[in-house]
Image: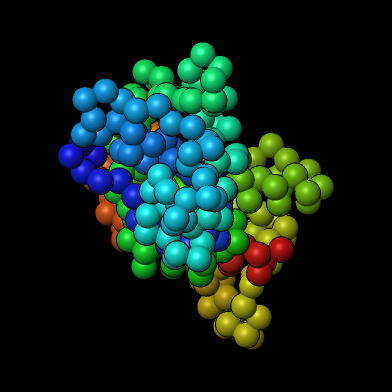
Amino acid sequence: MTASEAFFIGAYAKALEELKKLPLETQAILLLKRLRNVYYDHKVQPAQFCKGNILNKFAQRPDPESLAVGFPEDEKWSVVEHLLGQPWFYLEQNYHIETVAGNGFYRLTQQGLDKANDADGTVAPDRAVLAALKFLHPDLQSYGHYFYEGKLKEAVSAAFNRVENRFNEIKDASGNTAVTLLSGVVLPRKLIEFGVLRFPFDQLAKGNPTHREAFTDGLKNLFSSAIGWFRNSFQHEPYNLPELSEGDALEYLFVASHILRTIDRMV
């Protein structure tokens, strides 16, 4: 984002409830970028800003300082009130904004300006991608912040780390000493072989042990690949993998989601 470009928080969340679902840090950085856009861009001298002026209920219109551009008119007061709560406090705590001589007026610190000027959070994610997250396994539905932050490889790495951690949780809860010291790609195989995880589709190859064993081996291979391929490549060498589009990242998340749902059926 350059100083000539407008930056609207409303491009990232279309309603207050959607804004509230973002991680607090993301909300705060969006506020920081909007503060820079309103009070710094196109000005000879940066303007100081005051909470009282931003939330002036005696003004002739809601949101007189234009922080909530893009939100529904009937939500603008509520959006501004929300932004001036925890997101504002986050900016103060992390020294992105500072009060001027304790007089109630604020300005961006140099650290805050640097944060506001960097690339994170300057490209609004595809809303269709964000909407699709609700179909993921519950453990992955909160991953929208990775898309807002442009951290797509990190999203994939986190998803398959969650898969590996799920196997470790099952191992620890099983009390089975045969799997206690196992980890990595071998763990899911042994969880199945020692009966900690059961075959999840009772009617599949029922009465045909040879076919059932082949399907079971397929699940073992899928689970081991979740760690040996997906998790390890994105964890250890993401820089050697191609850059991802939002669609690419979403596709990977659905693979992880399917594996997590299958595991749930096997416990």
Quick check: 97 above or below 60?
above
Compare residues 202 and 241 and report the one nearer the observer: 241
Compare residues 182 and 210 and report the one nearer the observer: 182
Residue pictured at 72% horizontal, 58% vertical: 196
Label tally: 0
Q: Quadrant of the N terminus?
A: top left
Compare residues 143 and 91 and report the one nearer the observer: 91
Compare residues 39 and 5 and report the one nearer the observer: 39
Location of residue 213 in the rendering, given as x and y in whole percent from the top left corner:
56, 71
Residue pictured at 38% horizontal, 48% vertical: 66
Q: Left or right? Give the position of 250 relative to 175.
A: left
Residue pictured at 27% horizontal, 54% vertical: 245
Residue pictured at 48% horizontal, 17% vertical: 100
Q: Is residue 53 visible?
A: yes
Q: Quadrant of the C terminus?
A: bottom right
Q: Is residue 147 visible?
A: no
Location of residue 156 in the rendering, given as x and y in whole percent from the top left corner:
42, 49
Quarter location, residue 235: top left
Q: Pick out the residue farthest to the right.
A: 175
